Image (cartoon, grey):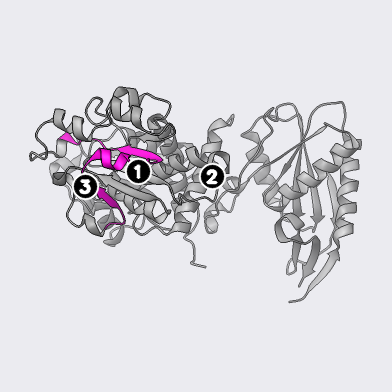
């Protein structure tokens, strides 16, 4: 199994910067903007996007994380996983625009679980989805609003996202 | 992890993991919707052969917060009083589709028997068996200690170097036994205090320091003092001359409480005998964790039920 790199550190930085601009452009009105990363790597990406948004329009972005473990539809089919922390900004998410952030969009099942988990915290005005990589093969009617890189892949391939915060290096690679 | 029967067999990593999951469970209490869907479609049976209010309610509330169906079964007024055996009762519950059975029984080893006799396949949680163990109580005590000491940075931490004094009826106390194993595993330094008559045989082999007098143990300036209930219902013999004398020598009186270091926690598993093992001024102070222990009990039991029942059994990596 050989891993072929598809995004390097500066590609990732560029993609996140573009996503941050797109999110601000798509924003209507001046409601709150809450970035919630899906652990583990989504959390790191949400923090990065939040920082870029904050540079462009200071004070706009609020960042947190949303664990989806207990809302997954495969919970009873796999080994028990320990949930990761969920951090919701103290002002809550009612009436805010929530941008869910994850590293890879694949079947869409994680995002479905995230939408369920989100409902336990309140009622956002709108929910958007930003992902670093969209590799296709959706199993649910879910799509991303902001995509760093569309990466056509076969189901037999594996996509690896590595981030400095978690893995010590920034890289996206695909292995067959 | 398939069953939770004792804290003696818990390794440090597993114990910390349970406490970490309990942190996440505790966080759900602040949410708009406090219920989690993790055990939807699962059935948890509370099988109580012995009186209990707080443990039963705590398990019931934990299972419900995780969306499990809960059946509570008290031995009183059931076929057990007609002479039904533990085996028949267990098999009846399995026929009802129980995924987990929370059992409290007056006989030591009842939970172990239920788990390993081959009668049933459900996960077993020991909610107190005789004078043997009460693992979820020890876990919630460790959780309470860890939260008070480490606050928001508690995740991943153990209790290394924390000094805990456990006082009272060690002989009959399953809470003490479970706490001794768990706290020692987590790196805490455990001191036990009891009248000689209430020290079990073999206590010398436990990973603890034993004191006969409370004042000697308190002189070690502990981080926490855990007062055990004098279990009048198990006091068939005269273990000490009188309750007044017990209270004077081994009780956390107002004077002893006042002499403690200012940040020493006062713990009690409840229900308390006020004025006997603990003075009201200690029980009601801000250093008392009694009510926190009750709240944390639900989080711990959620974590345990979640880890035992939610997924398929883990393969050992």
Cα gap from disc 1 to disc 2, whole angstroms: 25 Å
Residue located beneath label 3 in the image: B130
- Residue depicted at 50% across the width and 53% down the height: B17
Q: Is residue B219 magenta?
A: yes
State which mark lies toward you, 3 or 2.
2
Q: Secondary structure at mark 2?
A: loop
Q: Is A17 positioned to the left or the right of B305 in the image?
A: right
The numbered dot on residue B154 is 2
- Highlighted magenta segment, given as a residue range: B206-232
Distance of label 3 from label 2 (alpha carbons)? 32 Å
Write down the quadrant of residue A2 in the picture: bottom right
Q: Residues at marks 1 and 2, common chain?
A: yes
Residue visible at 52% across and 45% down in the picture: B38
**In magenta segment, residue A137:** no
On the image, which quarter does residue B141 sit in? top left
**Callout 2 crowding tier (Cα within 10 Å): few <14, some 14–19, many ≥20:** some
Picture layout, residue B113 above or below residue A36:
below
Chain assignment, label 1: B
Q: For numbered disc 3, what is the local secondary structure?
A: loop
Q: Is any part of residue B287 visible from this angle? A: yes
Q: Which residue is mark 1?
A: B220
Q: Nearer the viewer, residue B130 or B238?
A: B238
The picture quadrant where one finds residue B137 is: top left
Q: Rounded to the nearest whole Å, what is the CA distance between mark 1 and mark 3?
A: 31 Å
């Amino acid at each position: 199994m050989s891993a072929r790199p598809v995004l390097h550190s500066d590609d990732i930085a560029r993609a996140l910067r573009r996503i941050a601009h797109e999110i601000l452009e798509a924003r209507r009105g001046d409601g709150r903007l809450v970035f919630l990363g899906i652990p583990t790597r989504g959390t790191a990406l949400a923090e990065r996007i939040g920082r870029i948004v904050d540079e462009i329009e200071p004070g706009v972005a609020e960042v947190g994380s949303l664990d989806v473990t207990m809302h997954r539809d495969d919970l009873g089919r796999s080994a028990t996983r320990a949930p990761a922390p969920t951090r919701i900004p103290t002002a809550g998410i009612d009436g805010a625009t929530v941008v869910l952030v994850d590293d890879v969009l694949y079947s869409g099942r994680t995002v479905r679980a995230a939408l369920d988990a989100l409902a336990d915290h309140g009622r956002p005005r709108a929910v958007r989805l930003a992902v670093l990589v969209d590799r296709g093969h959706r199993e649910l009617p879910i799509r991303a609003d902001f995509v760093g890189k569309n990466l056509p892949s076969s189901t037999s391939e594996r996509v690896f996202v590595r981030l400095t915060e978690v893995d010590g290096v920034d890289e996206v690679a695909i292995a067959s | 992890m398939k069953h939770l029967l004792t804290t003696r067999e818990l390794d440090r990593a597993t114990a910390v993991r349970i406490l970490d999951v309990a942190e996440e469970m505790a966080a759900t209490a602040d949410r708009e919707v406090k219920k989690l869907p993790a055990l939807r479609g699962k059935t948890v049976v509370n099988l109580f052969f012995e009186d209990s209010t707080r443990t039963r309610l705590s398990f019931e509330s934990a299972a419900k917060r995780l969306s499990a169906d809960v059946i509570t079964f008290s031995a009183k007024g059931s076929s057990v009083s007609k002479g039904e055996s533990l085996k028949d009762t267990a098999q009846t519950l399995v026929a009802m589709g129980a995924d987990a059975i929370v059992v409290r029984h007056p006989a030591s080893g009842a939970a172990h028997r239920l788990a390993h006799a081959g009668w049933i396949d459900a996960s077993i949680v020991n909610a107190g068996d005789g004078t043997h163990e009460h693992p979820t109580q020890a876990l919630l005590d460790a959780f309470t200690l860890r939260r008070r000491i480490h606050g928001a940075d508690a995740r991943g931490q153990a209790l290394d170097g924390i000094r805990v004094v456990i006082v009272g009826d060690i002989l009959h106390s399953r809470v003490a036994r479970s706490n001794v194993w768990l706290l020692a595993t987590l790196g805490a330094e455990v001191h036990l205090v009891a009248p000689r008559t209430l020290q079990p045989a073999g206590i010398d082999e436990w990973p603890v320091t034993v004191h006969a007098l409370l004042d000697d143990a308190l002189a070690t300036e502990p981080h926490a003092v855990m007062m055990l209930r004098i279990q009048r219902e198990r006091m068939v013999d005269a273990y000490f001359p009188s309750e007044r004398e017990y209270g004077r020598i081994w009780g956390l009186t107002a004077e002893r409480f006042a002499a403690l270091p200012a940040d020493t926690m006062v713990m009690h598993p409840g229900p308390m005998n006020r004025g006997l093992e603990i003075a009201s001024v200690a029980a009601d102070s801000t250093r008392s964790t009694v009510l926190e222990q009750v709240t944390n009990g639900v989080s711990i039991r959620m974590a345990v039920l979640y880890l035992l029942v939610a997924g398929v059994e883990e393969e050992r990596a």
